[in-house]
Amino acid sequence: MTFGIVGLGLMGGGFARAIRRAASSSGRLAEAGWSEASESEIFACDTRADVLEAALAEGVIDGAFSMQNAAAMLKKCSMVFVCVYPDAAFSFIKEHAADFAPDAIVTDIAGVKGSEVAECEAACPQYIAGHPMAGSDREGFGHSDTVHFEGRNYIVIPRSVASSASHEAGQLSDVERLERFKTIIRALGFGQIIETTAKTHDSKIAFTSQLCHVIASALVDSAEDERVTEFGGGSFEDLTRIAMINAPLWTELFLSNKDALLPHVDTFLDSMQKFRAAIADDDAGSLEKYLAAVRTRRALMRKTESRAESK
Amino acid sequence: MTFGIVGLGLMGGGFARAIRRAASSSGRLAEAGWSEASESEIFACDTRADVLEAALAEGVIDGAFSMQNAAAMLKKCSMVFVCVYPDAAFSFIKEHAADFAPDAIVTDIAGVKGSEVAECEAACPQYIAGHPMAGSDREGFGHSDTVHFEGRNYIVIPRSVASSASHEAGQLSDVERLERFKTIIRALGFGQIIETTAKTHDSKIAFTSQLCHVIASALVDSAEDERVTEFGGGSFEDLTRIAMINAPLWTELFLSNKDALLPHVDTFLDSMQKFRAAIADDDAGSLEKYLAAVRTRRALMRKTESRAESK
């Protein structure tokens, strides 16, 4: 196996490190029956030569390519993770559609999918959209060891545009490609793999991820001063950990998924107003009823999480 | 030392356990120079006989009293933690003001202070208001081992009503009582002790704790279904962990501190609307600027937290 990473930032670096572990002689790829896993190579291309040099020196990657020379890397790779920002990732996949090896698996990690997935599927028969539910409050390759995949969810979007028709005899079918993709994702340490559509992905992620980032940001924004955490008991800290936000990336994510995000924002604001009204009206009966329902609901959600973890 | 716990629930049980550890022959009370610490006794009174029996059987307490017989316990105690709900705690302290030992330290753990602190101070010269910034998503004595005090903040409200005038010669002065209180709190594992007024406490806690609980509850309330956590990457889970909420307790906390809480709710809603408008208007420039400011602000808050931890 030859793995290619496009964009060796926080997530690209995280993937390179996880692949290195999975491909060791005692790693999960060997366990999964891939006898040649330990001979795997990891290549990366990036705009920053210093990052590539650091990764080579650390032994995280085996070969480095400039972005101009990406095609030379792509044709060697049996699996390519495109780990640049969403818009750039979709553009890259479409522009380089002819450069990928016929039997390769090509995937992105974009947090919003939209109509881009169908376009990339049409342009690139080797493409399967994915979204690792993992991250860090740091940025860049230098912090990529803070990204942990162990047990985290991975959302996979099986192709809606069939690629088999464009395939030569003997090449991977869509089904085989998806199975191989999932085997690798599991070997990287991820827990549950959720298969869904681009539309469902965007709607659910708008709630579980983007709305939460808006809330955390608004909460930090609304603090009267920065010393308020001296009075913290963990609640504010828990709610705002994700406010250590990558501004350009999340601006892109919020705006490109605004059609799914805004309705969730409004539903949340309605709930806030419901609680606000009960407090303002001294309506202990309603408030206690709402809170009891929230507790029941959150407990059911906890079961859903555990189910996900146990798979 | 004889410690008394009024209300052996989650927090009362947590205090009993922490006192037991601190008072062991190698514990922090002995370290702090209290040579007789290991001879300390822990008493508790509660409405539930089964809870008292369980705590006695487990060795968490040394003596049990019914609530009707609380006075018999109080007069033996050199330190009393009143760990019932806020309104009940303030009533208890005022009703039993004559039952506490003259040199005792009497404290509560109520999450809202309001005008009750001054009333309790006036009624009970031994009283110092406090608020441990710790808790659990569980309830009751049976889960009191899930409460962890190590390194957490403790808010202490030095008396505004001087008690020295009412004291006999040879008794503890307010200053001595406060110092002894803080020594014990540190021995229980707490990190930074913040001294403030009841008013500042209520205003800050309305933001760092109560607003966060309203937000977490509204977020769970606004979820379209309970299976949404299958798409979770940790953000929603972090933001809603505290939504495992004790409905009667938090109803009381929200309503008794509504004058401080509602302005924070409104400021937060204003911030949400600011972010919402930037998203709705595709205003990438403003959004990126807001998010960058949030990141800077949260990083400064992180320094405040670390400062608190290092003290």
Image (cartoon, coloured by chain):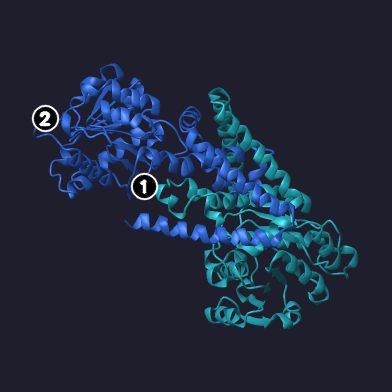
Chain colours: A blue, B cyan
Query: Percent from the top left, x then y, of residue B35?
Result: 64, 70
Q: Quadrant of the C terminus of chain A?
A: bottom left
Disc 2 or 1, which lies upstream in sequence?
1
Q: Which residue is mark 1?
A: A153
Amino acid bearing label 1: Asn
Amino acid bearing label 2: Glu
- Chain designation of label 2: A
Asked if residue A295 is positioned above or below residue A64 in the image, the reply reads below
Asked if residue B110 is positioned above or below residue B267 in the image, the reply reads below
- Chain designation of label 1: A
Which is more toward the observer, B273 or A11?
A: B273
Query: Percent from the top left, x then y, of residue A52?
Result: 31, 25
Work out whether residue B110 can be spotted.
Answer: no
In the picture, measured across the screen, residue B86 lies left or right of residue A119, that is right
Q: Which residue is mark 2?
A: A168
In the picture, measured across the screen, residue A60 lies left or right of residue B104, that is left
